[in-house]
């Protein structure tokens, strides 16, 4: 291997991680195989890599409040930095065994009988630390104003609609002022994204009617936009968004005939099929456009793998298996090509049962296979410019997912196969390179392995088993 290139990989400071590569390039070995052609034109830039590798919560997980400060259960800050996490959404920060100290409105303003103008009525200390943790990890804050999901079977009083919507909106305005205008010994963080509540059709999230939620959104969105015209104010759809309830939501927020800000809309999907992200993303975009909201951004701000909601333990087990990495890679590639402005994986926080939804690392900080997909995708994000990929193969987007990006000194290709068959591909890369490398790792090979490859007539031959994915790093000739 080229000594210079090897040194570059050693300086990454982290495993550049790809699951097993089943085949290498080699003309004699592959002459009898039927290859699917994939064409990648690095000279044809089609857009920027999008911030679809965001996450809910973290990087530091639930803390024990001790006399000498906060004792965090887990600090994943370095993982967030390595994966270039662009956004952290602060929802369910207090679920299920929080300390009534972080993010949620009742944690910051615990006594609703008090005056919202009274600075002493607010408790910002712990949330200040939580927000700083996010910013220190290099991410932007996507702040959910409202409450975490309630514990099943519990009374969950914080999920009741506020008794006074106007007062609740005033409290929210003071929270924004604390973090963006320095109010009450606050900060000037310029947090742009502020989402009002979460999944209003779920009893564990909102115990009022859907019409009451629309009213809360109208009152709060107008109040915030009046004082903070430059922030983005957003709504959260119902848990299972469809055309009917999305249409009703858009009508509901303008039911009183007055203008209501809607800068962005967050929606959720848990699935085992990346194609469903595409279907839902197009549905949301089309309904917004049809109703005059073409400027409203959309964010898939909760997603993960779910095959069957009736078997939660099987889901939690699945997201810790090596095969989940290929699903995550395929999903991130899909979202990059879908009409969404960003996405946030659920979830990055770890403690107790809540750790079950994180397939990136365990509650001891040990990396899980899913993390590797996020890290590989982050390499494309780092390169910055998505380039055109074409193929006549009916496998592309139906089981095999491909995304490529161009940078100043190198280029990258991420490929995932979530289909049921081994796939043989020929990658036509239309260029010459000083080095072409495939980087692989699995549980039998825990150390990074860099395999130098050669192109034949501008093509790279690969064979990828089902449930595998790989990252190809191409060093540009100088």
Image: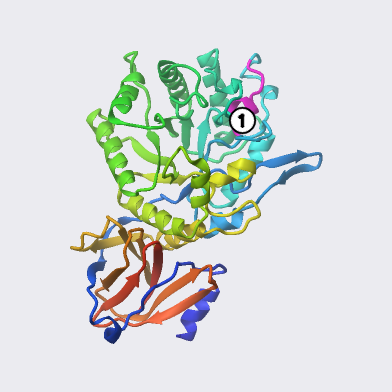
| Number of residues whose C-alpha sits closer than 10 Å to that of mark 1, classed few (under 14), some (14–19) or many (20 or more) | some
Answer above or below: position of 263 versus 131.
above
**31 relative to 49 in the view: left or right:** left
Tally of numbered discs: 1
Image position, residue 44 (x, y; %): 24, 64
Quadrant of the drawing holding the C terminus:
bottom left
Magenta: main secondary structure: loop
Answer above or below: position of 245 versus 212.
below
Mark 1 lies on a secondary structure that is loop
User: Which residue in the structure is indicated by mark 1?
Assistant: 183
Residue in view at x 47 percent, y 30 percent: 198
Residue 61, located in which quarter of the rendered image? top right
Residue 349, located in which quarter of the rendered image? top right
| Magenta stretch contains residue 111 | yes
**373 relative to 245 in the view: left or right:** right
Image position, residue 94 (x, y; %): 61, 34
Answer above or below: position of 112 versus 172.
above
Q: In the rendered structure, which segment of residues is drawn in magenta? A: 103-112
Residue in the foreground of this view, choosing between 410 and 75? 75
Q: Is residue 409 visible?
A: no
Residue in the foreground of this view, choosing between 69 and 201? 201
Image position, residue 468 (x, y; %): 40, 64
Quadrant of the drawing holding the N terminus:
bottom left
| Magenta stretch contains residue 453 | no
Residue in view at x 29 percent, y 26 percent: 244
**154 relative to 290 in the view: left or right:** right
Q: Is residue 300 visible?
A: yes
Answer above or below: position of 136 versus 122.
below
Residue in view at x 69 percent, y 47 percent: 73
């Amino acid at each position: 291997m080229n000594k210079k290139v090897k040194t570059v990989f050693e300086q990454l400071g982290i495993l550049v991680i790809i699951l097993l590569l089943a085949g290498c390039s080699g003309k004699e070995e592959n002459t009898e195989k039927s290859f699917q052609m994939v064409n990648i034109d690095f000279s044809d830039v089609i857009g920027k890599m999008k911030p679809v590798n965001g996450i809910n919560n973290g990087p530091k997980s639930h803390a024990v409040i001790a006399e000498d400060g906060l004792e965090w259960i887990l600090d994943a800050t370095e993982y967030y930095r390595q994966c270039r996490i662009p956004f952290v959404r602060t929802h369910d920060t207090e679920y299920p065994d929080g300390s009534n100290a972080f993010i949620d409105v009742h944690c910051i303003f615990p006594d609703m009988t008090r005056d919202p103008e009274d600075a002493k009525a607010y408790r910002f200390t712990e949330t200040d630390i939580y927000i700083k943790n996010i910013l220190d990890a290099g991410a932007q804050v996507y702040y959910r104003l409202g409450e975490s999901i309630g514990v099943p079977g519990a009374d969950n009083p914080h999920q009741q609609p506020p008794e006074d919507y106007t007062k609740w909106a005033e409290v929210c305005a003071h929270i924004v002022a604390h973090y963006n205008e320095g109010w009450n010994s606050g900060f000037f963080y310029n947090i742009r994204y502020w989402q009002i509540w979460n999944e209003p059709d779920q009893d564990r999230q909102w115990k009022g009617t859907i019409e009451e939620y629309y009213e809360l959104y109208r009152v709060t969105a107008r109040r915030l936009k009046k004082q903070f015209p430059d922030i983005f104010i957003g709504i959260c759809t119902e848990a299972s968004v469809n055309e009917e309830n999305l249409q009703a939501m858009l009508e509901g927020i303008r039911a009183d005939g007055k203008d209501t800000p809607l800068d962005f809309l967050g929606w959720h999907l848990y699935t085992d099929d990346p194609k469903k992200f595409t279907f839902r993303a197009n549905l949301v975009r089309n309904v917004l456009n049809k109703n005059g909201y073409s400027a409203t951004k959309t964010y898939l701000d909760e997603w993960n793998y779910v095959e069957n909601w009736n078997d939660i333990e099987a889901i939690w087990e699945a997201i810790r298996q090596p095969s989940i990495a290929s699903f995550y890679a395929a999903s991130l590639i899909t979202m990059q090509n879908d009409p969404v402005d960003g996405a946030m994986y659920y979830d990055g926080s770890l403690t107790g049962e809540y750790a079950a939804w994180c397939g990136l690392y365990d509650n001891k900080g040990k990396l899980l296979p899913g993390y590797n997909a996020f890290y590989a995708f982050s390499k494309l994000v780092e390169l910055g410019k998505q380039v055109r990929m074409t193929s006549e193969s009916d496998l592309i987007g139906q089981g095999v997912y491909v995304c490529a990006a161009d940078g100043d000194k190198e280029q990258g290709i991420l490929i995932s196969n979530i289909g049921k068959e081994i796939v043989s591909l020929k990658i036509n890369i239309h260029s010459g390179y000083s080095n072409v490398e495939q980087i692989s790792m699995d549980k039998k090979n825990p150390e990074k392995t860099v395999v130098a490859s050669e192109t034949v007539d501008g093509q790279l031959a690969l064979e990828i088993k089902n449930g595998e994915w790989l990252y190809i790093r191409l060093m540009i000739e100088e």
